[in-house]
Image (cartoon, rainbow, N blue to C red):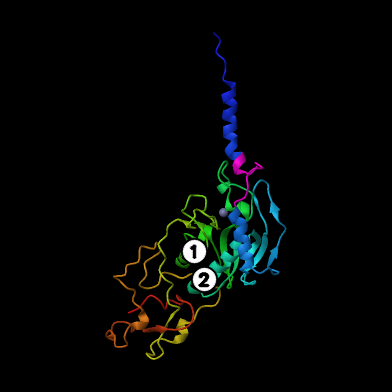
Amino acid sequence: MTRRVPSVPLRFTVLALLLPALSACGLFDFEEREPWRAQAEAACFARKEVVPSSAVRPMSKISGPGICGVDRPLKVAALRTGEVDIVPAATLDCPMTAALDRWMASVVQPAAYARYGVPVIAVKNMASYGCRTRNHAPGAKLSEHAFANALDVGGFRFADGREVTVKSGWRAGEADRAFLREVLIGACGPFRTVLGPGSDGMHEDHFHLDLARHNARGEAYCRPKLTPPPPAAPPVFMASPARGTVPVAAAAPPPGPVPPQQAAPGYPAPGYPAADPATPRTDPAMVPAATPMPPASVGAPPLVWQRGPGPLGYGGVTGSVP
Ligand SMILES: [Zn+2]
């Protein structure tokens, strides 16, 4: 008896292999975009969370391929009425544009001022709209990028010309590491998906931010879980004119670009171990003036510190807190 090759099951096998890929690409006509997307977009415009301008221009509707697209896309060249450029301009929906504005105002700019003393003036856009699956993986679910509901942020440019990229800054000096961690942690609020270096190996050079709906409760998915960096150091400590031992000019910042901050006195070196409330940081400004001075024979008298304007860490003045 001749054994027949089971050709029908083979065809089914091939189809079964193709189905997820075709489905994920949204190539089947019977698929429909989830209704919440259009609802969220309409609500965003109705609440005037985004007001079109020369920096945020309405675009033509994007329909397909498949269910990819967005009803009322925006070409976003700048956030916050032009204060922060998006370079290059991003194609985003209204809710993402509004969320980026909130993140910029409540998280990024405060962190920028605290860490560097200057604001962010541009955000590096590595990807916005794109009809594709998550991480470009065949057969995977469609990415929020496919609905203009996501932005990949590669870095930041500051008002003093400094640039901090996710790729190099994540493991760079204290200020860059702290700033990037602070803004990534803070993104888990305005956004529903937040992914950065250490999350899944696919986000080592950018932050992925989106407004996916993971469940009915609207919970966020944020990875990696990070320990918040120590708070930014106080702006500066200058030699006290009252003690008259060190010229104030010695504390003036050097010309040229602002150097990266080092770990402030009393702070741990980069690595961010969990904060220990049992060992509060000593604020040198709080050191009482009655602190005993060493004998005159033991070198120069120690510096006495007080708060003053300007950034921290210049001219070797820091680091010898009593
Ligand atoms: Zn992304």
Question: What amino acid is at disc 2?
Answer: Ser
Tell me if label 1 and label 2 are in contact, CB under 8 Å.
yes
Q: Distance between the residues labelled 1 and 2?
A: 10 Å
The location of residue 13, given as percent across then percent down, is: 56, 29
Q: Measured along the vertical axis of the image, is residue 305 above or below residue 280?
A: below
Please identify, in this view, whether the residue under mark 1 or under mark 2 is nearer the observer: 1
- Where residue 189 is drawn, which disc sits there? 1
> Can I make out residue 125 in this image?
no
Q: Which of the pair 299/17 is nearer the observer?
A: 17
The location of residue 220, given as percent across then percent down, is: 48, 58
Q: Residue at x 45, y 82 (%)?
A: 251
Q: Residue at x 62, y 50 (%)?
A: 33
Residue 77 belongs to magenta span? no
Residue 27 belongs to magenta span? yes
Mark 1 C-beta closer than 8 Å to ligand 1: no
Mark 2 C-beta closer than 8 Å to ligand 1: no
Question: What amino acid is at disc 1?
Answer: Gly
- Where residue 106 is drawn, which disc sits there? 2
Report ligand 1 position as a quadrant.
bottom right
18 horizontally vs 253: left or right? right
Q: Give the range drawn in magenta.
A: 22-34
Secondary structure category for the residue under label 1: loop
157 horizontally vs 311: left or right? right
Q: Which of the pair 5/307 is nearer the observer?
A: 5
The location of residue 320, given as percent across then percent down, is: 36, 77
